[in-house]
Each structure stands twice: as C-alpha cells, then as structure tokens.
Image (cartoon, rainbow, N blue to C red):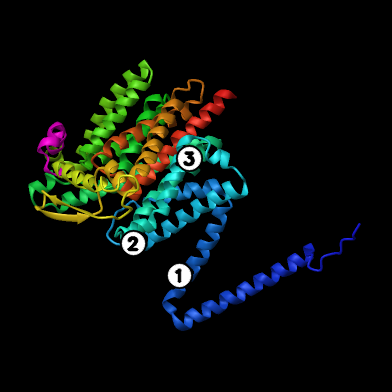
C-alpha cells in the first residue's frame, strides 16, 4: 500500500488567522490608496466613498439573511414605481440589486442546496422558468428584427421581475410567518402608492386654472399596485373578527381603493369588480352578505375621504367619476381611445401572422394609423397584452405565459378551498386568485407585461398563490 505524503500547503488554524490578518491589512492599505487617489484626481467622488462602504456592509449582512433580503427587495420596489423619462440612477441600483438577489437565490437553491425539486414542484413554476429562459435567449433575435438594445434590455428587466415568483412561493410555503410577511409587503406597497397618488392629485387640483382640468384630473400611475392591495385587503377584511384589526385593514382598503378610483382607469375598475365577483362566488354564504355590506360601507367611506381631501372640488370630481363609470358599457363603441387600441391590435395581428411560432422579439416595431392623433404611429407598445405576447414571443411565449398565469390563479383558488388549512393561508390563496384573474382581464386593453410595477405584482401574486397551495396541502396532510 502506497504511503500518502503530507501536503506542503496544508493550512493550520493559526495559518488561516495569519493570512486573514494580512489580507485585512492589505485591504486597508488598498482602500487608503484609493481614497488618496480620488482626493487627488476626483475630489467630488470622496463624499460617496463612505456610502459605498456602508452599502457593502449592508449588502453583506442582507445576503447572510435570505428572508430579510427578499423582504427588502420587495419593499424597495416602490422606489422604481414612479415612471419617469430616462434611466435614473436609483432605477439602475435597484435593478442590479434585484438581479443579483435573484441570481444568488437560484444559485444557492439549485446548485448548492440541490433543491430543484422544491423550486419546480408545481407545473406553473416550470412554465415560468421556461418562459424567462426563452425570453433571455431571444435577446439576439430581438435585435435581428430591429429592436434597439436599450429598449430590449428594458423590456427584459421588466419581465425578469416575474422571477420573484420563485422566492415568494418558497417564503409562503416554507416560512412560519411567510403569510404575514407577504401581506405586510402588499399593504405597504398599497399604502405608499395610494398616499403618493393622493398628494399628487391634490397638487394637480391646486394648479388647475380651468374647470375641465378639475374634471379630467387623474393620476394614472401604478394601477396594478393599487388594485391588488385593495383586493387582498377586501379578502382579509371580510374574514377579520377583531375590531382593531378590522379598522386597520379597512384603512388600508379605503386608501388603496380611493387611489384606484383616482386613476380613472375604467379597465381596472372593471377588473376590481370582476375579482370581487369571483370572490363572491367562492366564499361561504355568511361572508357573501358581509362582502355586500362592507362593499357598500367602503364606498361610503371612500366618498367621505374624498369630501375631506378634495374640499370644494369634491362635487365636480364626483360627477365626473360617475359620468366616466356609467360610460363603461358604451366605451367599446364611443371611446375613441379604446377604439384606437382595437386598431392597434389589428395592425399588430397582421405582423403576428407573418411569424406566429417564434415571434418578432422584444422592442420590435410596427406601424398603424392612430385615430386619436390622426397620423401613422410607429412603436413597439401594444395595449392588448395577449396580442403583444404573441407578436413578440410567438405561440410558445403566449402559451407558456397564459398557462403560468391562469394555473397560478387556479392554485390560489384551490388553496382557499382547503377548509382544514390555516385561515391566513387560505386568504392569501383567495387574494392572489382574484388579483391574478382581475389583471388577466384588464390585460385585454392595458398591457401589464410592459411595465416593471405590474410585472412585479404579477410575479408576487402568483408566488403567493402557488406558495399558499403548497402550504395548504402540507398543513392538511399533517
């Protein structure tokens, strides 16, 4: 038997400590040299050095705590919820943070912990992964069809936010307080966006000089980030028995719902009613009555908030909202904006027929005659989300996304119907189910897959639905 010789490079604990000390000293010397260099060459950058160092320490601590890291990613999404022209520094920072988190999460779960079976334990998870994989592969194809790299990457980042589905699903399914954490995140997002929109709306009214500006005033931002929290709050509200909790949830619902009304988006109004109708069908009889009563009281509450915040403008705005709501039924024949979207979808469909299987890629452009501005418009945005999917990604993209979307909604409904599962798990399933169904309806006239905020909320809602389904099965089996 051959004798094994000792390795000359074997390290003892003392050696590791010595080399670690030397590495720290070398790092300190290098950092001081960098500071001296910046002081000499670019003194304007020096004040940002402590911020960078502090950010590094914060990131190091976050990546040691995966749940806290995920919650920070979700809470910080409000930073990029404001749609502004051009690429902002904070948007770049959040994009890098989110992508690094998602890459780290997948790397640890699939490559290190070997938990592929848990990551892809439901069919909708596999469908979404294939969709995101093929979308990433299609980036060169998109550029071959004339898509500009900057716009292609912008659309890819928005779709990549759907990937939050995977860590959110794991959080709800495996963490003891996962349901509380995701509901807290959704409540925070709804409150933040609603308060910001209310303040922006008030500012717009104060700057109005004509009565028509008051009547048509709106804050058409982050509709999805208002509709989904409002639906989750409504679900929790009708099942809450403690008065303190009920008042808290009622406040969240009223603010989110009021913000949704101020968007004056008839599509999302109809989507909210559609989600409430599904909820009415699924809940037990006693909760159907409570839903109707609370819905009526909620409407009165929103009117009361409007009277407080809007003051002298309240009556004029209320009349305008009623007029807009009552015109929903005739919008398809009289609303020039909606009719124009039908023409837009028809023009895109002609391009779909030329390459129906593979699609034309992200940021691919087409032209159609815009009847609102009376000229031919060239662009890549399509208001119909399903036509947009087919145009950009072909039949494979449309099929995978529709399967993922509706399968996740179905999972949420199944989780709610598990009577022996914990109540909060069931409510998370129901809230996600009606939210996904509502956004799927509005996708016919307002494409949610082109904006970071709506892709974020779809991914999170779907993750809650699938996670609630997996957890409900585990709880019932136990």
The mark that comes first in sequence, 3 or 2, is 3
Q: Magenta stretch containing residue 105, yes or no?
A: no
Q: Residue 150, labelled with which disc?
A: 2
- The furthest residue to the right: 1
Which residue lies at the image location 45% right of the left edge and 49% below the top edge?
133
Mark 1 vs 3, N-terminal side: 1
> Hey, which residue is sitting farthest bottom in the picture?
40
Residue 262 at what x, y percent from top left? 22, 41
Distance (Cα) linking label 1 and label 3: 42 Å
Q: Considering depth in this image, is 371 or 41 the residue closer to the camera?
A: 371
Foreground of the two, 251 or 376: 376
Q: Which residues are magenta?
A: 319-337
Kindly report which numbered mark, 1 or 3, lies closer to the viewer in this rendering: 3
Point out residue 477 in the picture as x, y percentages from the top left corner: 58, 24
Question: Is 163 placed left or right of 266 in the picture?
Answer: right
As drawn, is 206 to the left or to the right of 180? left
Which residue lies at the image location 47% right of the left edge and 35% below the top edge?
Answer: 123
Q: Of helix, strand and loop, which one carries label 1? A: helix
Classified by dominant secondary structure, the portion drawn in magenta counts as helix
Decide which of 179, 129 is in the foreground and name it.
Answer: 129
Q: Where residue 326 sits in the image (x, y, percent)?
A: 14, 32
- What is the quadrant of the N terminus in the image? bottom right
Residue at (21% x, 46% y) in the render: 350
- Say which quadrant the C terminus sits in: top right
For the residues marked 2 and 1, what is the alpha-carbon distance in whole angstroms?
27 Å
| Residue 427 position (above or below residue 138) | above
Asked if residue 89 shows in the view, the reply is yes
Instruction: Tell me the SS state at disc 3.
Output: helix
Label 2: which secondary element? helix
């Amino acid at each position: 038997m051959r004798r094994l010789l000792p390795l000359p490079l074997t390290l003892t604990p003392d050696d590791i400590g010595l080399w670690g000390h030397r590495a720290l000293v070398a790092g300190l010397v290098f950092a001081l040299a960098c500071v001296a260099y910046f002081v000499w060459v670019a003194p304007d950058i020096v004040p940002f050095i402590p911020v960078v160092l502090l950010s590094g320490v914060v990131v190091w601590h976050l990546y040691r705590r995966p749940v806290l890291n995920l919650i920070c990613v979700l809470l910080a999404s409000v930073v990029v919820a404001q749609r502004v022209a051009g690429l902002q520094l904070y948007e770049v920072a959040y994009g890098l943070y989110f992508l690094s988190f998602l890459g780290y999460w997948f790397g640890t779960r699939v490559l290190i912990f070997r938990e592929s079976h848990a990551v892809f334990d439901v069919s909708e998870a596999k469908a979404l992964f294939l969709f995101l994989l093929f979308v990433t592969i299609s980036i060169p194809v998109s550029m071959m069809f004339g898509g500009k790299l900057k716009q292609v990457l912008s659309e890819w980042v928005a779709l990549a936010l759907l990937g939050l589905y995977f860590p959110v699903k794991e959080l709800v399914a495996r963490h003891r307080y996962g349901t509380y954490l995701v509901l807290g995140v959704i409540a925070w997002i709804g409150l933040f966006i609603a308060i910001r929109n209310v303040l922006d709306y008030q500012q717009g009214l104060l700057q109005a000089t004509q009565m028509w500006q008051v009547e048509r005033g709106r804050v058409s931002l982050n509709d999805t980030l208002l509709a989904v929290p409002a639906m989750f709050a409504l679900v929790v509200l009708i099942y809450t028995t403690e008065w303190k909790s009920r008042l808290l949830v009622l406040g969240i619902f009223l603010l989110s719902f009021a913000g949704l009304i101020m968007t004056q988006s008839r599509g999302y109004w109809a989507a909210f009613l559609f989600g409430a109708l599904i909820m009415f069908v699924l809940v037990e009889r006693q909760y159907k009555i409570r839903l109707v009563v609370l819905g009526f009281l909620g409407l009165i509450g929103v009117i009361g908030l409007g009277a407080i915040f809007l003051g002298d403008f309240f009556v004029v705005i209320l009349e305008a909202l009623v007029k807009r709501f009552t015109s929903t039924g005739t919008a398809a024949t009289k609303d020039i904006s909606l009719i124009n979207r039908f023409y837009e979808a028809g023009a895109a469909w002609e391009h779909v027929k030329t390459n129906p299987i593979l699609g034309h890629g992200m940021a691919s452009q087409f032209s159609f005659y815009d009847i609102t501005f009376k000229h031919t418009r060239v662009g890549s945005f399509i208001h119909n989300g399903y036509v947009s999917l087919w145009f950009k990604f072909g039949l494979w993209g449309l099929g995978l996304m529709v399967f993922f979307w509706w399968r996740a909604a179905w999972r949420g409904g199944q989780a709610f119907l598990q009577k022996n599962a914990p109540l909060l798990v069931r409510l998370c399933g129901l809230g996600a189910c009606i939210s996904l169904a509502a956004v799927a309806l509005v996708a016919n006239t307002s494409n949610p897959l082109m904006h970071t905020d709506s892709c974020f909320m779809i991914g999170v809602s779907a993750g809650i639905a699938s996670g609630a389904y997996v957890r409900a099965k585990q709880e019932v089996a136990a």
